[in-house]
């Protein structure tokens, strides 16, 4: 008995993700599913935390992602790698979550206040931004700037910059050409450069005041 | 100058180009101030992006490895300390080495450092497995229950349908019977009525015939008596005249009665 359990476990641990998923599909093997979760939970939680902008919400959404994978286990056809499939589901789940959150916050003033605080922090004219904004607040500004990007750009930035996926892999996850991914990345970095101009290094601050003034209008159009 | 496009610069910044192309772009960057400005901005944005760090994760593989690494370090430190103490003791006090004590000290230090970390890891792993297995079995159970419920509902629906069908059939037969009975009764009544009418007709006819016969007989008698009366009258009034025909007699009689 002990030996059979041991051999079963060692067998299980040598499985690839795709093989484990096949077991989940064919035999409802909860151990194989647990193996997949153990392998991927950390990465998916991190990805969801980045995509939702909140660690706790990221954890919840990651849980939801694995639930979806199990509930729709027979939808996985093995055309893409399991990693790609899983990331696709995570992106969708986070997208749903963001939409839900947006609907909820549209009625409350909280959201607008946060946005205004962000703009105010960026455009405080009397003190140099480096003096105003401590390291942690700067990180917060970066996060907020990311969330001003269109979703399709933000996804690319998060997958490439934070998750370290190659452009080819991102193209696979998003199901778009690689060139599109790279041009979205360039556009995202350019826009972020514009959003964060006041806190970027000294030499780029030169034409800041003019750009900074036009910023709220541009946002108003969006 | 032929500038590389933005897509290619992205591949350059994230080091996804081949070595040769990477070197070419680097060379271009040295000469082209326009591209240099773009790349500088992008690089500074990338640096800013690095500022947004997620807090250390509470669980996951990296955490486990980290714990073990630290436990190993502490163990090593404890062992070193014990050996140092032992060496000092050996040098200062000329007593025989206490192997038992050393063994115990090693054991307790190992226990105190390694055990909690390992135990915590095992507990965490078990907890997670358990939760996932529970979630899996919950979903499976839900599927199964749903299936069973549908099956029973179908069976029940079939049963009910069959029962209601047979009941409907029974009621229909009863209805047909009732209609048949009513029709038969009606027919009987109609037949009886017709018979009655026929009987009445026959009776009326015979009465009518009788009446006619009586009338004819009485009329005949009356005529006979009238003729006799006429004859008598003739005899009484004009015994001398010759009577040519009966009608003339009557006329004369009428004229006379008028006078």
Image (tube, coloured by chain):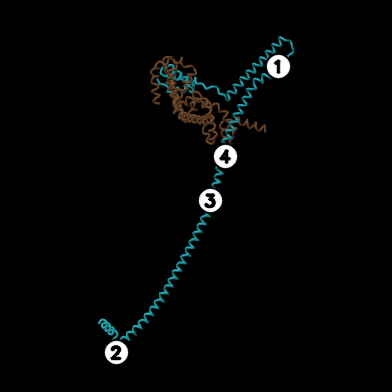
Chain colours: A brown, B cyan
Q: Position of residue B74 (x, y in %)?
A: 63, 18
- Name the mark nearer the viewer: 2 or 3: 2
Q: Position of residue B122 (x, y in %)?
A: 62, 26
The residue positioned 73% from the left and 14% from the top of the image is B97
Relative to the observer, which residue lies in front, A40 or B171?
B171
| Above-or-below relation of B92 to B112 | above
Q: Which secondary structure, mark 3?
A: helix
- Identify the residue under disc 2: B239
**Tag 4, which chain?**
B
Between discs 4 and 2, the one toward the N terminus: 4
Q: Which secondary structure, mark 4?
A: helix
Q: How many marks?
A: 4
Q: Is residue B24 visible?
A: no
Residue lying furthest left: B259
- Name the mark nearer the viewer: 4 or 1: 4
Whether labels 4 and 2 belong to a single chain: the reply is: yes
- Identify the residue under disc 3: B164
Q: Which mark is residue A203?
A: none
- Identify the residue under disc 1: B102
Q: Position of residue B222 (x, y in %)?
A: 36, 81
| Above-or-below relation of A130 to B182 | above
């Amino acid at each position: 008995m002990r030996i059979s359990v041991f051999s079963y476990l060692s067998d299980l641990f040598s499985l690839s993700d795709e093989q484990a998923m096949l077991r989940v599909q064919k035999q409802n093997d909860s151990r194989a599913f647990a193996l997949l979760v153990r392998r991927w939970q950390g990465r998916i939680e991190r990805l969801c935390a980045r995509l939702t902008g909140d660690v706790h919400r990221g954890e919840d959404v990651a849980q939801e992602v694995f639930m979806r994978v199990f509930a729709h286990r027979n939808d996985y056809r093995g055309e893409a790698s399991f990693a790609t499939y899983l990331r696709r589901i995570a992106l969708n789940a986070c997208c749903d979550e963001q939409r839900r959150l947006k609907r909820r916050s549209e009625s409350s003033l909280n959201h607008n206040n946060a946005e205004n605080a962000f703009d105010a922090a960026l455009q405080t004219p009397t003190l140099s931004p480096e003096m105003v904004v401590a390291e942690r607040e700067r990180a917060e500004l970066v996060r907020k700037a990311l969330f001003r990007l269109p979703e399709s750009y933000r996804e690319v930035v998060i997958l490439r910059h934070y998750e370290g996926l190659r452009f080819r892999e991102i193209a696979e996850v998003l199901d778009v050409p690689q060139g599109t991914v790279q041009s979205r990345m360039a556009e995202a970095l350019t826009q972020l450069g514009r959003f964060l101009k006041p806190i970027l290094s000294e030499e780029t601050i030169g034409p800041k005041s003019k750009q900074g003034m036009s910023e709220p209008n541009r946002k108003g159009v969006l | 100058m032929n500038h590389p496009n933005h897509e290619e610069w992205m591949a350059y910044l994230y080091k996804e180009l081949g070595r040769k192309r990477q070197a070419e772009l680097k060379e271009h960057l040295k000469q082209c101030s326009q591209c240099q400005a773009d790349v500088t901005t992008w690089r500074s944005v990338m640096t800013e992006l690095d500022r947004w760090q997620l807090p250390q994760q509470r669980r996951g593989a990296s955490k486990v490895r980290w714990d073990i690494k630290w436990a190993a370090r502490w163990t090593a430190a404890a062992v070193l300390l014990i050996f140092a103490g032992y060496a000092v003791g050996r040098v200062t006090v000329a007593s025989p080495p206490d192997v038992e004590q050393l063994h115990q000290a090693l054991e307790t230090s190992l226990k105190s450092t390694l055990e909690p970390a390992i135990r915590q890891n095992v507990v965490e792993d078990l907890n997670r497995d358990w939760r996932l297995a529970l979630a899996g079995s919950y979903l499976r159970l839900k599927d199964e229950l749903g299936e069973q419920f549908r099956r029973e509902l179908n069976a029940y629906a079939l049963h009910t349908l069959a029962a209601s069908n047979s009941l409907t059939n029974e009621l229909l037969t009863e209805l047909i019977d009732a209609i048949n009975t009513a029709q038969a009764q009606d027919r009987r009544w109609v037949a009886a009525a017709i018979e009655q009418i026929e009987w009445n007709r026959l009776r009326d006819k015979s009465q009518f015939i009788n009446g006619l016969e009586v009338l004819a007989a009485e009329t005949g008698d009356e005529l006979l008596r009238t003729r006799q009366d006429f004859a008598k009258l003739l005899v009484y009034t004009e015994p001398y005249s010759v009577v040519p025909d009966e009608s003339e007699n009557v006329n004369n009689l009428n004229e006379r009665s008028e006078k």
